[in-house]
Amino acid sequence: MIARMVALVNALAHRAWTRIEAVKAVAYVERL
């Protein structure tokens, strides 16, 4: 059960990180 919670937290963190990276990439392109 703890492993499942850790996997869920890891998946959510990864999704949030990819969203942040996508926003940074879009902002960088918009600045050009």
Image (cartoon, rainbow, N blue to C red):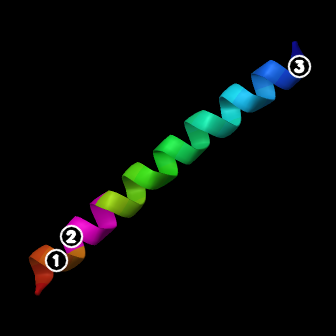
Quadrant including the C terminus: bottom left
Position of 26 with respect to 19 (left or right) is left
Q: Is residue 18 above or below residue 21?
A: above
Residue at figure coordinates x 32%, y 59% from the top left: 22
Disc 1 to disc 2: CB gap under 8 Å: yes
**Is residue 21 positioned above or below 9 on the image?**
below
Q: Which residue is mark 3?
A: 2
Q: Amino acid at mark 1?
A: Val
Place of residue 29 in the rendered image (x, y in percent of width and height, measured from the top left): 16, 77
Answer few, some or many: residues within 10 Å of disc 1's Cα (few below 14, many 20 plus, some between 14 and 19).
few
Q: Residue at x 68, y 39 (%)?
A: 10
Residue pushed farthest right? 2
Is the Cβ of the residue at disc 3 closer than 8 Å to that at disc 1? Answer: no
Q: Which residue is mark 2?
A: 27
Task: Name the residue: 87% across, 12% down.
Answer: 1
Circle 2 — which element? helix
